[in-house]
Structures are given as structure tokens and as C-alpha cells.
Amino acid sequence: MTAEARPAAPPLTERQEARRRSILQAGAQLAGRGGFEAVQMREVADAAGVALGTLYRYFPSKVHLLVALMQDQLQHLHASLRRRPTAGDDAAERVAATLMLAFRALQREPHLADAMVRALTFADRGVSPEVDAVSRLTTAIVLDAMGVEDPTQEQLSVVRVIEHTWHSALITWLSGRESIAQVKGDIETVCGLIDLPADTRR
């Protein structure tokens, strides 16, 4: 049965935010050691020092937790890129370099990366707010690298194709079906769409 989307939650207090942070850290540690299957909610609660019922109030399932972890990592990446943008002669080069930077960050912890990507893949409508937040952050990161503040619908379409390719490349690399060099080639190829004249994309 598909879960219904939840209404937006009120802002967290400082204490609640600290508790949420502890839960995310515990989930990341478990996922980093053993991937998706290693993230068991009771073990997360024990590691975070919270009651199981409290954990479920923050994250109704481990899919919610792992997608929130992906959101958290992208927020840190976005902030870092705002401070120090990637270099490149054109938008395509900058976006490709940015996505490879994100890929290499995930590559450093492959079990955690696999857990987060699997959670995104398994997410149903009940996880829509978290998935939408991940999508918005990814789009913002790509648009920043492009140097675009007010994108056209055509530019947003190109960004969506780039995001789909990046996500697919992550899955194929995590499954051992694609090398890092192939991932880089795929990302550079799809980023080439950015600088194509509009009439060649129709």
C-alpha cells in the first residue's frame, strides 16, 4: 500500500534539531559500515541515544532517514560550492566538474552512497517531501555551476536530463557495471547539451 504524503512539519527547536542531527549521524555510521541492510531502526535509535518511538516521529522509516541523509550531504556540498565554485571555461565544463566532485564525495563511502541511492530508488509518495528536497538541491547545484539564476523551461529540461544521467551513472557504478572513467564520460557527454544551440536540441 502506498503511503500518503505527509503535511509540512513545523520548524524544529534547537534541541529537536540536535536530536535529529544525532539520528542522522547514527544512520550514516551504520550505513557506512554495512549499506542499506545495516540500517535497522532500533540500532539507529540505540546509537543516537533516543527512544524508538522518538526516532519514528522524526523518520517514519529507514527510507525517510536515508533520503534525509542524502539531502543533508547535498546541503553541505551546495554550501561548499557557493564558497568555492568549480572552475571551467564554459557551463558544460563547470557542471561536469561539479557533478564529478559530488560523485567522488560519494565514492569515499560506497556503502553509505549505495544505501542513500537505494533509498531514493525505493521511495514512494510518502517520502515525496524528502525526495523533492533532494531534487531541488541537485537542480540548484547544477544551475549555480551553469551560472544561471532565472532558468528557462528549456534549461530546466536540460538540467533534468543531466540529473537523470548522474543518478543512473551512480546506480551503474555502485552495481559494478560501470567504471569511474565511464561515469566521467557519461557525465561530460550529457553536460554537452548545455552549450548546444537551442535549435539542435529539438
Image: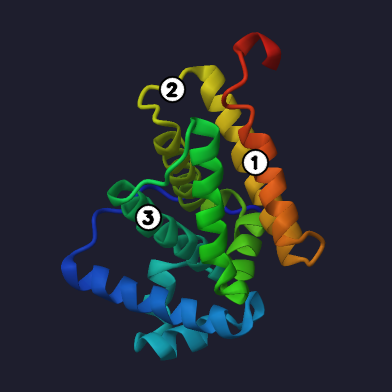
Residue 6 location (% of width, % of height):
45, 50
Residue 17 falls in image quadrant: bottom left
Q: Residue at the spot x=52%, y=47% of the render?
A: 97
Judging depth in this view, the residue of 25 and 90 nearest the camera is: 90
Mark 2 residue type: Pro
Residue 154 falls in image quadrant: top right
Decide: is 183 above or below 142.
Answer: below
In the rendered image, the residue lying farthest to the right is 177
In the rendered image, the residue lying farthest to the top is 199
Mark 2 secondary-structure assignment:
loop
Q: Is residue 157 visible?
A: yes
Q: Residue at the spot x=53%, y=83% of the render?
A: 30
Q: Residue at the spot x=66%, y=58% of the render?
A: 122
Q: Label 1 crowding class (10 Å Cα cut-off): few <14, some 14-19, many 20+? A: many
Mark 1 residue type: Glu
Would residue 158 appear left or right of 43 to someone viewing this image?
A: right
Residue 46 location (% of width, % of height):
43, 91
Which residue in the protein does label 2 denote?
151
Q: Mark 1 or 2, which is nearer the eye?
A: 1
- Give the Cα distance between marks 1 and 2: 21 Å
Would residue 190 appear left or right of 28 to someone viewing this image?
A: right
Which residue in the protein does label 1 denote?
188
Which residue in the protein does label 3 denote?
75
Q: Earlier in the sequence, mark 3 or mark 2?
A: 3
Q: Residue at the spot x=66%, y=79% of the render?
A: 37
